[in-house]
Amino acid sequence: MFFKKKKQTEDPKEVPISNSLEKNTKHLKQLFSFGLNKDFSVREITARYSNKKINLFFYSSIVNSTKIHEGIIRPLLEAQGDDLTTIITLENIKESKDFGEVVDDINSGNIVLFLEDSNKAFSVNVADFQHRGIEKPENENAVKAPKEAFTESLYVNISLIRKRFHDKQLIAEAKPVGARSKLDVTVMYIKDVVNNEVLENVRERLDNLTIDNVRNIESLEQYIEDRPYSIVSSLLYTERPDRAASYLEDGYIVLLMENSSACLILPVTFWSFFHSEEDRYLRFLFGNFSRLIRFLAFLISLLISAVYVSVTNYHNEMIPPDLLLAIVSARERVPFPVVFEIMLMEVSFELIREAGLRIPNPLGPTIGIVGALIIGQAAVEANIVSPIVVIIVALSGLSSFAVANISMNYTIRLTRFIFIFSAAFFGMLTLTGAFLLWVMYLASLRSFGVPFLAPLSPNFQSNRDTIFRKMIKNEYFRPGQLKPKDMRKKG
Amino acid sequence: MFKKESRLGAREGFAMITMMIGVKISNTTPSMFAQTGANAFWLMPLISMSVILPSVILLYYLLKRYKDKNLVELTEHILGKHVGKFVAFLLFVIFFTLLAIEGRSYTEQLKMLYFPESPTPFIFFIFFMIAFYGAKRGLETIGSTAWAFFFYIKASVILLAFLALREVIFARIFPIFGNGLVPLLTEGAKKASLFSDIFLLAMAYTAFDSTKKFRKGVFSGFAFVFLEMTFFFLLYCTIFDYNSIDKVAFPFHEITQYVNMGNFFTNIETFFMIFWLFAALIKYMIYLYLISWIFGAVFNIKEFEPLILPFAFFGIVAGMVPENAVINELVFKSNFMDMITPFLIFFPFLLWVTAKFKGDLKR
């Protein structure tokens, strides 16, 4: 509205390919700044089958040179045949008629062949982008679960998912995104399960992106999400292919991109942030026990500091006398009010966490020493904080790690401060109110049209996989809140 | 597909009506009943229920016959524009006054029990501010939240009942009719507006996913909360004896202070207060939302949600009118409940007779 759109000038890329090889070569060399651009390579060959000149264009840094040699150059020099397609031994050959396509192809790691006296270009995929191998998940650890994680290559990631779900209806649809640097966002879904309305919604959002460059899933998340200012994320970020596959099976949509060692799952509910894939692999009781612990951790992390503030300030009759005496005697020489004390420790804890994350590996142990000794022991000995507050804050910090998902983790950490302030304001009255309003906020959210607390409320036909899950044998349905085309999973 | 359907189903209706009426178990209503009913006041909900039930059924029958109409639209449709608007406005006044009086009552409870040094208007303000923000999020969210909290609130109540059981001396229900059958019946009938909330919730008739789910939810909730209320009133009657029952101002909170969990946790009233507050706040959110809706419907204001803020504010102002808590309870609340009972009983009959006369019901 306020900024003018980029002017649509005559784009040199949109020129059609001419019949003259010389002209085409010159144009392409100019487009790619040949000579200046060191890894842009041009190779001239006289093909044996036609005795005509063929020019090859590619970026030498992003192609597989043995593949080019074995599959293209050698056949061209040696083999005999009728036309190009019978000579080149690689998987597929694409024809294109204008420079726009040619440029995109070269950028994404194809080799492009221009023939003498032909107004067509042929491109062959020989891309070989460098990437890490498949490693263990770094952030979503599990004991009883597959140990493969996504890596920064789209093909590898798709293959990891396909490996887990063999179905011809599993679609990996590519949507190019970005005006300057075009990258494909791969939308994966199961065609006869996914809800079309959600799928259309995603496609629309991807189509409507007017931006030069989206580098990876992590930034894509922020471009397509519902409420950028919200305290809760509306997409699930996971690095586990088994998790992605199980969501796909339930009718969710998975977004993948080159350069990201993770995927995005949508639409999400509160429960997808709360669950971990491992509690489906664990047996019924074990899995639910782990969920119970996590739910406790969730509540402790959210509320314990706030409850401490409100109980000690406003409702101290609630504390049993012996405990009250213990707290009072511990606080005897601390000069600060309770809220300040709690805030001091909470902020220090956040500092340790942030510093611990950014600190170079060799220095890692330092943070433990500094954190534990200075903040823990010295602060207590110096009467800055009381030991009970250290316990409370350590407990709330520890519990927040049990909420594994990174988005939910931030949500909790931010909310905790809101609750501490509200508890300081009017004790349990405001704390209760703040908690209620926070839950109401969650209840009012929608992620791509799906209510955030479903299927708890509103109710849908589903497996009721909320805090606890059912026996795996008794799970008959896909989550009804997504309105999948195929509701039944079993039986 | 996602946009059109409402998120409110039978569960939400059930939870909402249970919250709205159920909170009355834990406020000053039982002590008001005990003034006249003495140790037999646990029978009064039964009497009130049997007095008001025909009207409720009639109203819901009419709502069912005239499909897709909420309370105000129904009234206007049957009684004509002017009379209908007048009656609907009366409904608004009734529920607004209830909001103010009961709001004050809750504030006084909070103040006396937990914040004795804070000024009443300030607590009132905070209480209604929270309710306002909740109401602002819309009925669907309130319904969902009501259901999400339902189990936790009821679990705390069951825990309380369980802990209180050992204080019960069952013989205290005798004499079975307390001060006598006649005063019990008259008082029970007079206070039939105990269940007025079910009339208010009829405003949300069309907001639900389907009207069938609405009826199912509301009536099962109504039955549930009636049983719960009778059970709890019985509990109060048998815990506090004949002499002291009418002197206990807040039986629910009295019990929470009475009970303990073992020898270590002896003062657990704040624990129950949290769940009590959840229920009370959700009730006020529903009230604020529906009252603004009635007002908007009467005065043809389509976008009624901005009205929630002024009504929350005027609710505080009106609630501050009674001089003190005692007057608020024993004069304002008691008399007002008596006053609106005949209106609530006869209003559905008026609708029904008019509809019958107009010939709408033949089909």
Image (cartoon, coloured by chain):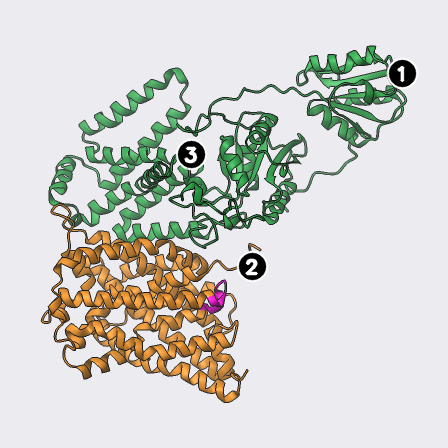
Chain colours: A green, B orange
What SS does tag 2 mark? loop
Q: Which three-letter amino acid code belongs to the residue tagged 1?
A: Ser
Q: Which residue is mark 3?
A: A281
- Disc 1, disc 3: CB below 8 Å? no
Residue B334 found in image quarter: bottom left
Q: Which mark is residue B4?
A: 2
Q: Chain of mark 2?
A: B
Which numbered disc, 2 or 3, marks the residue closer to the eye?
3
Which numbered disc, 1 or 2, marks the residue closer to the eye?
1
* CA–CA distance in space, label 1 to label 3: 61 Å
Q: Position of residue A447 (x, y in %)?
A: 51, 47
What SS does tag 3 mark? helix
Q: Main secondary structure of the magenta part?
A: helix
Label 3 Cα crowd, 10 Å radius (few <14 / some 14-19 / many 20+): some
What SS does tag 1 mark? loop
* CA–CA distance in space, label 1 to label 2: 65 Å
Q: Which three-letter amino acid code belongs to the residue tagged 3?
A: Tyr
Tag 3 or tag 1, which sits nearer the N-term? Answer: 1
Relative to B346, is A198 above or below?
A: above
Same-chain check, marks 2 and 3: no
Q: Which residue is mark 1?
A: A50
Image quarter where the N terminus of chain B lies is bottom right
Label 1 Cα crowd, 10 Å radius (few <14 / some 14-19 / many 20+): some
Q: Which residues are magenta?
A: B204-212
Q: Position of residue A148 (x, y in %)?
A: 49, 25
Residue B307 found in image quarter: bottom left
Q: Chain of mark 3?
A: A
- Is residue B255 in view? yes
Query: Furthest residue to the front?
Result: A491
